């Protein structure tokens, strides 16, 4: 029996996979989405940033996101565990206009919306299903799927890995990874009721709290539930992650107050060893998207944004390569270059966060040269920079580097206050 032929097979039906599938289907391509999980399912990565809105609009799903009842997010707030300092990044005040707000999303519902849109656009779906093998052929790929215990063979001109940090295609092709130049960390998190939050429009903001050796996130999901997680360095002690979470809350005055009435809703979950970059994101008729290409760090909530951006870049690359067969190598090189540039911009911001002297500059914003507005725009996800934003962000990074050497802005004491 002949294998069914597709223009594109996408492994993974999260935001990267469904976005790529939707954009390609909208362009008339026959797309198959494959995912081993049954939706809805729990997933972390609940805080969007406004730059992601563009791709959601391009997919034709933004109106559904607006009507879904998600918590509106107008900014991001950064503080210390001692409560000593607090900086509010209001997206509407960033150097790049039109990025006023986005949403905090429960990923089970958000991912369901995106998957429904992909199917509406014309994508076929195998779920639950798993890609067992993938073999390159002269015309693309031959892939074996396991669908409810039944093996199915399909063929595709293009293969996209959007299966997340499992590195499915990277392992299959033997593509090496490079570690992110940051200490190894783990995240432990849960949903809670009773967590404090600001009043008014700022009640939907994410709050990022720096504590010794790590940081907390606090993401309001609806009127009662809040996602709270701790990111900490590995190897500090042998305490169980859940116990580390409670200990860190107890050790810092801001978090003690913030979590005084908090009650866990679900079981605690842990993620570890999550930061890496593949050395290659693309090759002959294959592309890696989102977390499958690389994952930097959750501190600036860039995961879903980079997933959607990579999907848009991937769809553009495939359409361009199909239209210009002799230029495929150039097209995929451009895909890799542009996606890597977006990741590197966010990585520069992450490095600022984890270096105490650089973070002191971040926590002492200045309006001079519109530097705070420029940093605000990058926090909102603006990684495709015009000249005005580019030189201001470069100046900000330069000031951070100078502060590491000359201590122009004193670092805040992060010692736990017991």
Image (tube, grey):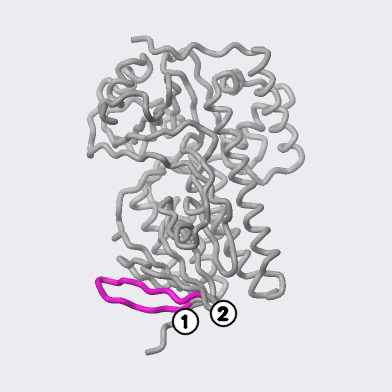
The N terminus lies in quadrant:
bottom left
The label on residue 138 is 2
Q: Would you call the spot at circle 2 few (<14 residues within 10 Å), some (14-19), or many (20 or more)?
A: few
**346 left or right of 160 in image:** right
Q: What is the distance, in whole Å, between disc 1 and disc 2 at their CAs?
A: 14 Å
Decide: few, some or many residues near mark 1? Use Cα within 10 Å; few <14, some 14-19, many ≥20: some
Q: Quadrant of residue 258?
A: top left
- Residue under label 1, please give it: 5
Question: Looking at the picture, how far across and down is residue 42, in whole percent?
Answer: 31, 49
Predominant secondary structure, magenta span: strand
Specify the label residue 363 is tagged with: none
Tell me the element at label 1: strand
Residue 156 in the image, given as x and y percentages of width and height? 49, 76
Q: Is residue 144 magenta?
A: yes
343 magenta-colored? no
Residue drawn at (52%, 13%) of the image: 412
Of 71 and 384, nearer the camera is: 384
Element at badge 2?
loop
Q: Position of residue 377 (x, y in %)?
A: 62, 36
Question: In the rendered view of the protein, which quadrant contains the C terminus?
Answer: top left
* Residue found at the very far bottom of the displayed protein: 1
Question: Which of these two is toward me, 92 or 165?
Answer: 165
Q: In the image, which residues are magenta? A: 141-155
Asked whether 147 or 224 is in front, the reply is: 147
Q: Nearer the viewer, residue 123 or 413?
A: 413
Q: Of the two numbered discs 1 and 2 on the same chain, state the one appearing first in sequence.
A: 1
With respect to residue 371, does 357 lie above or below?
A: above
State how many labels appear: 2
Residue 247 x, y percent position in the rendering: 29, 20
Which residue is depicted at the point 48% across and 39% down?
Answer: 301
Left or right of 161, for residue 246: left
């Amino acid at each position: 029996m002949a294998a069914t032929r597709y223009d594109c097979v996408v492994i993974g039906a999260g935001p990267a996979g469904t976005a790529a599938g939707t954009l390609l289907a909208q362009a008339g391509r026959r797309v198959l989405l494959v995912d081993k999980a049954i939706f809805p399912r729990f997933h972390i990565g609940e805080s969007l940033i406004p730059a992601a809105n563009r791709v959601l609009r391009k997919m034709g799903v933004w109106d559904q996101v607006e009507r879904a009842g998600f918590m509106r997010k107008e900014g991001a707030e950064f503080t210390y565990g001692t409560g000593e300092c607090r900086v509010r990044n209001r997206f509407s005040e960033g150097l790049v206009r039109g990025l006023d707000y986005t949403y905090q999303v429960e990923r089970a519902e958000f991912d369901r919306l995106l998957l429904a849109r992909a199917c509406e656009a014309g994508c076929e779906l195998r779920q639950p299903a798993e890609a067992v093998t993938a073999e390159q052929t002269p015309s693309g790929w031959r892939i074996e799927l396991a669908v409810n215990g039944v093996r199915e063979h399909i063929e595709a001109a293009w293969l996209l890995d959007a299966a997340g940090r499992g590195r499915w295609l990277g392992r299959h092709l033997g593509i090496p990874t490079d570690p992110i130049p940051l200490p190894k960390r783990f995240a432990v998190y849960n949903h809670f009721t009773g967590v404090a939050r600001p009043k008014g429009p700022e009640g939907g903001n994410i709050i990022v709290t720096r504590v010794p050796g790590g940081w907390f996130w606090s993401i309001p999901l609806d009127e009662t539930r809040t996602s709270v997680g701790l990111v900490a360095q590995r190897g500090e002690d042998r305490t169980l992650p859940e116990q580390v979470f409670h200990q860190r809350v107890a050790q810092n005055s801001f978090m003690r107050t913030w979590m005084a009435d908090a009650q866990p809703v679900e079981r605690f979950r842990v993620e570890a060893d999550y930061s890496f970059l593949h050395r290659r994101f693309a090759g002959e008729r294959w592309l890696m998207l989102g977390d499958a290409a690389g994952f930097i760090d959750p501190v600036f909530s860039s995961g879903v944004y980079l997933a959607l951006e990579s999907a848009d870049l991937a769809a553009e690359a495939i359409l361009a390569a199909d239209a210009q067969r002799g230029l495929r190598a150039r097209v995929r090189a451009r895909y890799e270059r542009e996606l890597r540039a977006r990741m590197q911009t966010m990585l520069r911001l992450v490095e600022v966060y984890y270096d105490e002297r650089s973070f002191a500059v971040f926590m002492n914003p200045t309006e001079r040269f519109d530097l705070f507005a420029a940093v605000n725009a990058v926090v909102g996800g603006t990684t495709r920079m015009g000249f005005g934003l580019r030189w201001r962000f470069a100046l900000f990074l330069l000031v951070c580097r100078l502060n590491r050497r000359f201590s122009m802005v004193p670092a805040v004491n992060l010692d736990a206050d017991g």
